[in-house]
Amino acid sequence: MKKANDYDSEINMDWINYMIMAAQHSKGNASHWFRYLRKDINNYGELFAKKEIDALFGNENLTLFQRVSLRTAFEEGSPTRQHIIGLNSPAKTNMLSAIKARLEAAKA
C-alpha cells in the first residue's frame, strides 16, 4: 500500500477527480460528504500528500463547508477528523443494551 510520501513527486488526479465528483454528489448533505471522506481517512493515516489536498481545496466545485471540513479532516486531532474516524468504528451499543434490559425487566 502506498503512503503519502510515495506520492510527493506526483499528484494523484484520479483521487482528486473522485473527490470532486463526491463533492458535487454530496452538496448540501454533510453526512454524505463525511462518508466520502471516511473512505480516505482512518486511524492509520491518509494516503494522500499535502499537494493533493491543496489541489482539491482550491477547486471551485467544493462548497465552503466542504473545503473547511476537508482541511480540518486532515489535521491530526481535530474534532472533524475524530468524527470521521469514528464513522469507521463499530457502534457502541452498551447504552442500548442497558435500555433493552430495562425494557425487558419492566415487561416481566
Image: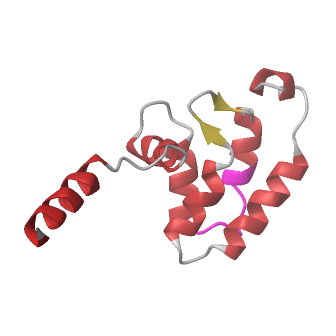
Q: How is the image coloured?
A: secondary structure
Q: In this view, does 69 lie to the left or right of 56?
A: left
Count the numbered circles shown.
Answer: 0
Q: In this view, does 28 lie above or below 30?
A: below
Q: In this view, does 92 lie to the left or right of 53?
A: left
Q: Position of residue 43 (x, y in %)?
A: 56, 31
Q: In which quarter of the image is residue 27?
A: bottom right
Q: In which quarter of the image is residue 96?
A: bottom left
Foreground of the two, 34 or 55: 34
Residue farthest to the top, as pictured: 5
Principal secondary structure, stretch drawn in magenta = loop
Q: In this view, does 20 lie above or below 69?
A: below
Question: Any magenta on residue 61?
Answer: yes
Q: Where is residue 63 in the image (x, y as percent from the top left)?
A: 59, 69
Residue farthest to the front, as pictured: 108
Q: In which quarter of the image is the N terminus?
A: top right
**Residue at the image position 76 percent from the left and 63 percent from the top:** 20
Q: In this view, does 59 lie to the left or right of 43?
A: right
Residue farthest to the bottom, as pictured: 28
Q: In this view, does 83 lie above or below 63?
A: above
Q: Position of residue 100 (x, y in %)?
A: 23, 61
Q: In which quarter of the image is the C terminus?
A: bottom left
Q: In which quarter of the image is residue 107?
A: bottom left
**Residue at the image position 50 percent from the left and 68 percent from the top:** 30
Foreground of the two, 7 or 84: 84
Find the magenta span and give its range.
56-64
**Residue at the image position 18 percent from the left and 65 percent from the top:** 104
Q: Where is residue 65 in the image (x, y as percent from the top left)?
A: 50, 64
Question: Any magenta on residue 36?
Answer: no
Q: Is residue 102 left or right of residue 71?
A: left
